[in-house]
Amino acid sequence: MSRSTTAWRNWGRTELAVPAQRFVPSHVGEVAELVRGAASDGRRIRPVGAGHSFSSIAVADDLHVDLRRLSGLLSADVDHGQVTLGAGTRLAEIPALISYYGLAMPNLGDIDAQTIAGAISTGTHGTGSRFGGLSTQVAAVQLTTGTGELITVSAADHADWLDAVRVGLGALGVITAVTLQCVPEFVLAADERPEPLERVLEEFESRCDGADHFEFYWFPHTRTALTKTNTRLPFGAQRAALPPLRRFVDDTLVSNELYRILCALQSRAPATTPTINRLAEKITGNRSFTDRSDHVFTTKRTVRFREMEYALPRGQVPTVLRRLQKLIKERDWRISFPIEVRSAAADPLWLSTAHDRLTGYIAVHRYWRDRDTEPYFDATEEIMLAHDGRPHWGKMHTLTADQLRTRYPRFDDFRAVRDQLDPQRVFANPYLDRVLGR
């Protein structure tokens, strides 16, 4: 097991930590040893995955545990469609690992840089009103508790804890392996096109209900929504993948390299933002293709940004987006990054943002070098909270335990499980103290 004391930064550059020690264990036994030592010495320990959360959920000033070496496919049960993966396995690696067995993940988000443990711990989701977030795919979790005990939580073992552990915020233990319930491989027919924003808002719920996966982006200062509609097809369906050159131009040159230049220009000269956004809506989001699911779900993102995302009752999405549209105009803000709108099915997971309700998501972003971003995020959060919003655990927000308790019916049940699995608060940090209490 290697160790270091180097500084740690997250991808969005919203958080910086200098842990007293940082460990990179190579097997599960080392994790248990670290936790037992921390508990004995009264120290705190935080696991970290890819660092793709914008909140301070992974920040540690004492012991940091990097799970990158606990990765890869550990086992596959083809008859039951289940695979077990090391906690540090990146989402981007999973399709290739499980396609050998003819399996795929039922849904993915648009970014696949996260580790599987980090993704489920923060409630990462994709889009599709008949599909839950990534945590709903979890059949079992292996974790080391705050006393250093290695346990498996599944429908057969500690079943009462499963709906707490599947979105656990890293507060219940260090996850070392995750078992996913997969589906047979499939392809997606993708239709991406610009449409009038107001019409999309009027039809939002019917569009969500009528498609397997529907989402859209809106560039502020424009009247156009860039819609994405994905239809699930059998794996043997005829494909019409994007030619390599077209994908390189669209996803690398235009969506990343050119967009990086435009964002930097807007950051230095905000008055150019409306003109550049109108240009961006014209050169992106107009194509159709059919390809394997992971090639359609995920998108390459290299331009750094900061993000706040809230989950809303799905029917509130059009109202909230119109309020944001009005707010940006009234405050005369220059917002270069698009607003992303998605949906997800209700689920039973205690701290899932889609707990017990059909959910719509609105995510707002700012280029990471933009100045004075707080007023935009603060005003957005105020609107979201007025419409029964729940913040994404891995994105920026200001809520406290008292505020979150009123938004999650099983909040205190989760805290009770935490008392059992981490009675000494070995895994606590300032973020968890704020959102869960001490």
Image (cartoon, rainbow, N blue to C red):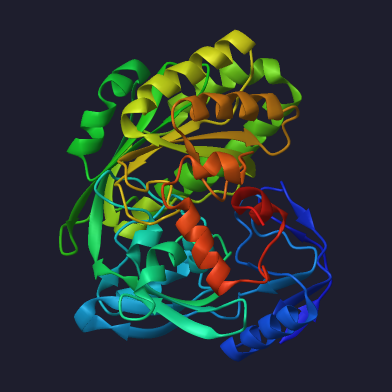
* Percent x, y of residue 435: 61, 49
* Percent x, y of residue 298: 42, 53
Asked which quadrant contains residue 155, the reply is bottom left
Q: Residue at x 33, y 56 (%)?
A: 107
Report the front residue among 428 and 412. 412
- Whether residue 80 is situated above or below residue 106 in the rendered picture: below
* Residue 291 appears anywhere in the view: yes
Asked which quadrant contains residue 190, the reply is top left
* Percent x, y of residue 80: 22, 79
| Left or right of 35 on screen, residue 352 | left
Which image quarter is the N terminus in?
bottom right
Report the front residue among 244 and 398. 398
- Whether residue 410 is situated above or below residue 6 in the rendered picture: above
| Left or right of 283 on screen, residue 198 | left
Which image quarter is the C terminus in?
bottom right
* Residue 173 appears anywhere in the view: no
* Percent x, y of residue 4: 81, 76
Asked which quadrant contains residue 191, the reply is top left
Q: Residue at x 84, y 70 (%)?
A: 20
- Whether residue 171 is situated above or below residue 287 in the rendered picture: below
